[in-house]
Image: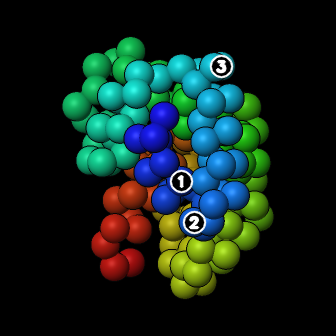
């Protein structure tokens, strides 16, 4: 479970209570939408879905949906709660123009499967936030 602490870097501002909250959410989601720890760790380190087999990709995608649902960024049907995402991004001190660009690029209505939408948002966030927007 110690290796999952890296997950908190993406989901919340770092503090002792935030990490404990993150770990609790990871445990909840691992109970309902389990993902192999090696798959999660590999993804958190490399941010690359391309190395996963189809069933692993699906597991991780649904795990991400659960995480976003627990953080109240999405509902279980795949609808985004944009206000909540924006609030988190502001608290994480992302520049407002970057927030707008990320949300415009990363929230798409073309995808209908909730797990796929969560995965797309994650891929888009990592690929667009890692470089200067």
Name the element at disc 1.
Answer: helix
Is 132 above or below relative to 104? below
Residue 93, how many percent across, how many down? 58, 81
Q: Which mark is residue 14?
A: 2
Q: Which mark is residue 32?
A: 3
| CB contact under 8 Å: marks 1 and 2 | yes
| CB contact under 8 Å: marks 3 and 2 | no
Sequence-first tag of 3 and 2: 2
Residue 78, how many percent across, how many down? 67, 37
Name the element at disc 3.
Answer: helix
Is 104 above or below relative to 53? below
What residue sits 55% from the left and 84% below the top?
95
Q: Which quarter of the figure has residue 11? A: bottom right
State the residue position of label 1: 8
Q: Is residue 85 rendered to the left or right of residue 57?
A: right
Residue 6, how many percent across, how many down? 44, 51
Can the viewer see residue 93? yes
Separation of marks 1 and 2 at Cα, in angstroms: 7 Å
Can the viewer see residue 86? no
Separation of marks 3 and 1 at Cα, in angstroms: 19 Å
């Amino acid at each position: 479970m110690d290796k999952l602490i890296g997950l908190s870097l993406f989901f919340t501002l770092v503090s002792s209570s935030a990490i404990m909250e993150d770990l609790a959410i990871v445990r909840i989601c691992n109970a309902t939408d389990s993902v192999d720890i090696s798959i999660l760790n590999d993804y958190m380190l490399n941010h690359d879905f391309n190395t996963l087999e189809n069933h692993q990709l699906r597991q991780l995608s649904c795990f991400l949906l659960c995480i976003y649902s627990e953080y109240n960024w999405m509902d279980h049907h795949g609808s985004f709660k944009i206000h909540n995402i924006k609030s988190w991004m502001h608290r994480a001190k992302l520049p407002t123009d970057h927030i707008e660009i990320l949300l415009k690029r990363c929230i798409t209505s073309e995808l209908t499967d909730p797990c796929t939408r969560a995965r797309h948002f994650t891929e888009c966030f990592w690929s667009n936030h890692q470089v200067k927007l």
